Amino acid sequence: MDAVVPLLILVGFLAVALGFFAWLASRMRRRGLAGGAVGAALASYEEAFRATAHASHVEIRAQAERKEPILSPGDHWGRGSGTGRPAAGSSEQS
């Protein structure tokens, strides 16, 4: 019985440490706090083992790199200030 207690403590500590690092990794991914190297390492891991997560990662990166919002098909195109929105003085017809 005396040999089991240190083993349980060790297993419990490892479980807590792994859980903490998994939580930290998910938090860093969500907030975008991962540096370039960490982000690339996580992306390569996801590409190898979780293909759908890698596809989502690529799509999120593409959205983040866009400068202007993309207009919907029903939006009116006008001469605006380059923001993708109609100009303030333009007349919109319904």
Image (cartoon, grey):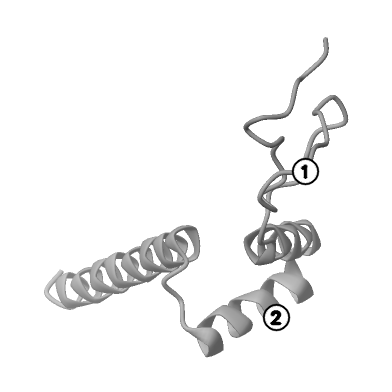
**Residue for point 67% across, 67% down:** 65
* CB under 8 Å between discs 2 and 1: no
Residue depicted at 42% across the width and 65% down the height? 22
Q: Identify the image quadrant of residue 91.
A: top right
Foreground residue among 26 and 84: 84
Q: Quadrant of residue 45?
A: bottom right
Q: Nearer the viewer, residue 73 or 45?
A: 73
Give the CA separation, mark 2 to mark 1: 42 Å
Numbered label attached to residue 79: 1
Check disc 2 and give the amino acid type. Answer: Ser
Where 52 falls versus 9 (above or below)?
Answer: above
**Mark closest to the chain's N terminus, 2 or 1:** 2
SS for dot 2:
helix
The crowding category of the residue bearing disc 2, from other C-alpha atoms within 10 Å (few below 14, some 14 to 19, many at least 20), is some
Farthest-out residue, front: 89
63 sits left or right of 77 in the view? left
x, y percent for residue 30: 48, 58
Residue extending farthest to the left is 2
Q: Which residue is mark 2?
A: 44
Q: Amino acid at mark 1?
A: Arg
- Looking at this view, name the residue that lies furthest to the bottom: 37
User: For the N terminus, which image quadrant?
Assistant: bottom left
Give residue 21's mark. Answer: none
Residue at image point 49% right, 65% down: 29
Observer-nearest residue: 66 or 54?
Answer: 66
Residue 8 x/y as whole percent: 23, 68
Q: Nearer the viewer, mark 2 or mark 1?
A: 1
Instruction: Indicate the position of residue 81 as horizontal and vertical percent values.
Output: 66, 50
